Image (cartoon, rainbow, N blue to C red):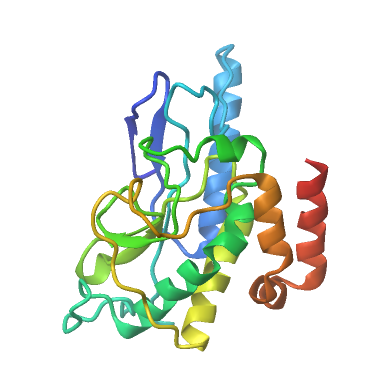
């Protein structure tokens, strides 16, 4: 744990885990959740990681920060000081473009339960859209940091997600953007909750499953058997 702080809702706590490679970070996420539940139980308490436990209060999210480095972990590949797009390199722009293009398809891995979709409410710190913006918390994807710390934050995921699946989906989308040299759309400016003509996230678990079912990119990245397994899981839910 790098740091923590009280959040907006009563009894709600934000915990930030120090960055690591994807698999290590997913392990840390899972161990942390289990450990917190165990410690709470020893004190006669219960902890929930529901995305939206009370409709009148802010939901609980899982914001995922991604950056890409060379194989020696010496060079931050998302940063280019000559770039006029907030210092985001061409590679970083392609990666972000891929995530935006496939965001609806991978939403199931960020919001895997019926309750997950109750969190997506305008004006509640949870995004309802698929746009990117620099240091803008109303956008589904937020560019943050600078220099070597420049990174993409996906704000879509809820606290109920499976980190292994969420990371796999986001990485698959980003790599598809690089492989296809996708062009990044113009930055969204302003309040994305009231923006007109911008793509929205799936409104329900059923809608998200339809998007996943039709995703050639995720089928190629994860395999048909994996996709079909989670389609079955989601439909059972």
For the N terminus, the image quarter is: top left
For the C terminus, the image quarter is: top right
Residue 167 x/y as whole percent: 55, 61
Residue 175 x/y as whole percent: 52, 78
The reply to whether residue 91 is visible in this rendering is yes
Residue 213 x/y as whole percent: 74, 64
- 29 or 215, nearer to the observer: 215
In this rendering, is residue 172 above or below 202? below
Residue 116 x/y as whole percent: 59, 39
The reply to whether residue 143 is visible in this rendering is no
Q: Is residue 33 left or right of residue 122?
A: right
Q: Outermost residue, front direction? A: 197
Identify the residue shown where x is 43% and y is 49%: 63
Q: Is residue 155 left or right of residue 111?
A: left
Q: Is residue 28 left or right of residue 139?
A: right
Identify the residue shown where x is 39% and y is 61%: 131
In this rendering, is residue 5 above or below 165? above
In this rendering, is residue 83 above or below 206? below
Identify the residue shown where x is 27% and y is 65%: 149
Identify the residue shown where x is 50% and y is 71%: 101
Q: Is residue 6 left or right of residue 234?
A: left
Query: In which image quadrant can residue 5 be found?
Result: top left
Query: In which image quadrant can residue 96 be found?
Result: bottom left
């Amino acid at each position: 744990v790098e740091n923590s702080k009280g959040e907006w809702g009563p009894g709600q706590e934000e915990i930030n885990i120090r960055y690591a490679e994807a698999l290590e970070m997913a392990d840390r996420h899972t161990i942390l959740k289990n450990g917190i539940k165990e410690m709470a139980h020893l004190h006669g308490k219960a902890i929930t990681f529901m995305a939206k436990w009370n409709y009148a209060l802010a939901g609980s999210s899982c914001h995922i920060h991604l950056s890409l480095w060379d194989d020696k972990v010496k060079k931050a590949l998302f940063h280019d000081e000559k770039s006029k797009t907030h210092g985001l390199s061409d590679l970083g722009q392609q990666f972000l473009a891929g995530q935006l293009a496939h965001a609806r398809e991978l939403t199931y891995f960020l919001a895997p339960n019926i309750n997950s979709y109750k969190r997506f409410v305008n004006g509640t710190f949870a995004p309802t859209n698929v746009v990117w913006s620099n240091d803008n918390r109303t956008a589904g994807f937020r560019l943050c940091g600078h220099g070597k710390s420049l990174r993409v934050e996906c704000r879509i995921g809820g606290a109920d997600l499976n980190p292994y699946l969420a990371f796999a989906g986001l990485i698959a989308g980003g790599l598809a953007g690089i492989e296809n040299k996708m062009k990044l759309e113009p930055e969204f400016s302003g309040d994305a909750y009231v923006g007109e003509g911008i793509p929205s996230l799936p409104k329900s678990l059923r809608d998200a499953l339809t998007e996943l079912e039709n995703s050639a990119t995720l089928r190629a990245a994860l395999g048909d058997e994996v996709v079909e397994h989670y389609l079955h899981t989601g439909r059972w839910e």
